[in-house]
Image: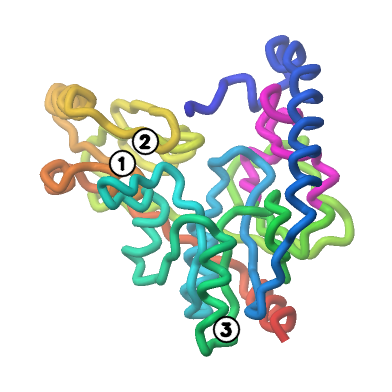
Amino acid sequence: MKTPWWFLSKNPVAILLVPVSWIYFGISQIVFHFRKLKPIKSKRKIICVGNVLAGGVGKTPVVRQIAGRLGVPIVMRGYKKNKKTGDIGDEATMLSRAGLTVHVGDRKSNILLLNRQDDNSPIVMDDGLQNPTIKKDISIVVFDESLGVGNGFLLPAGPLRVPKRFVSRADAIIVIKNKKSKKSFNLPVGVPVFYAENQTVSPYDENQKLVAFAGIGYPKKFFGALKNVVARRGFPDHYQYTNEDLEKLLMLAKKKNAKLITTEKDWVRLTPQMQDQIKYAKLETVIDGLFWDWLKEKLK
């Protein structure tokens, strides 16, 4: 899905959709309370890292940092996985490439499976803050400073999955810093807030002209992190590129005398042949040291 343009501002389209968002949230709460009847409690602590916005805040790099630092497994749904082809999904592939153990599929089943191991280390759950079937020991909400809470409206009028007040239920908040902070972005009082910084590392030098493309929640974030971009193309999140798409991109790059560049999340969705022709910019996330002190105490 391509992020709707009305998600980031209070415009007429968003306001017209507000009544629909109330109905949508009401139905989702009925389903939530029904699923809450039979939750499981893991013997291994569950660290849930999620967001209250519909994608695009930089949650996966935070998951990678936490799981890598602790040396623990990750359970995730594996968005757009395909059993027939063995595709585990772009985010899961990206985490696996970092040398992490990733269990894709039904999170509840995978947690029960991991509980059978002779291991008391925690489990990191990628997303699932709104999943009541699994009890979390530590819940962490990730925000991007430049996005904040968007226009503050619930889906489909805005990007929020739940009302802003639900954030106060989290154990901690990680805010990814950005040069441009959304003015209306206010955090709840009483919840520990930690900061992280993203650095997009291009495989090319600054003088190389680039044609950037991305199929992520907010492609503009990626484009803005690169230098000397002469053309850009945005696609829906988790977009599966066709041969025609890639041929057009290659032709555009040739016309601009530039190199194609994309995100790692997009790159893992390309065919091996295209991966040889196209490079990705690596996203490195550094979380404030105070967060690791807090997490260590919390895990005790």
Residue 256 visible in image: no
Q: Of the residues shown, which amino acid type is indicated by label 1?
A: Thr
Residue 130: say if magenta.
no
Q: In this figure, which residue is indicated by the disc labeled 3?
A: 121
Q: Of the residues shown, which amino acid type is indicated by label 3?
A: Ser
Q: Secondary structure at mark 2?
A: strand
Q: In this figure, which residue is indicated by the disc labeled 2?
A: 214
How far across and down, in percent of the image, does residue 10 sit?
73, 20
Label 1 environment density (alpha carbons within 10 Å; few <14, some 14–19, many ≥20): many
Q: In this figure, which residue is indicated by the disc labeled 1?
A: 262
Residue at far bottom of view: 118
* Residue ID at (54%, 41%): 56
Residue 114 as seen in the image, left or right of residue 141: left
Which image quarter is the C terminus in?
bottom right
Q: Secondary structure at mark 1?
A: strand
Who is closer to the viewer here, 52 or 209?
52
* Residue ID at (49%, 61%): 285
How far across and down, in percent of the image, does residue 263 sit?
35, 45
The residue segment tinted magenta is 143-167
How far across and down, in percent of the image, does residue 6 sit?
63, 20
Who is closer to the viewer here, 88 or 67?
88
How far across and down, in percent of the image, does residue 278 sit?
19, 43
Residue 95 as seen in the image, left or right of residue 111: left
What is the CA distance from the residue labelled 2 to the residue labelled 1? 6 Å
Badge nearest the viewer, 3 or 1: 3
Query: In the figure, 201 relative to 103: above or below?
Result: above
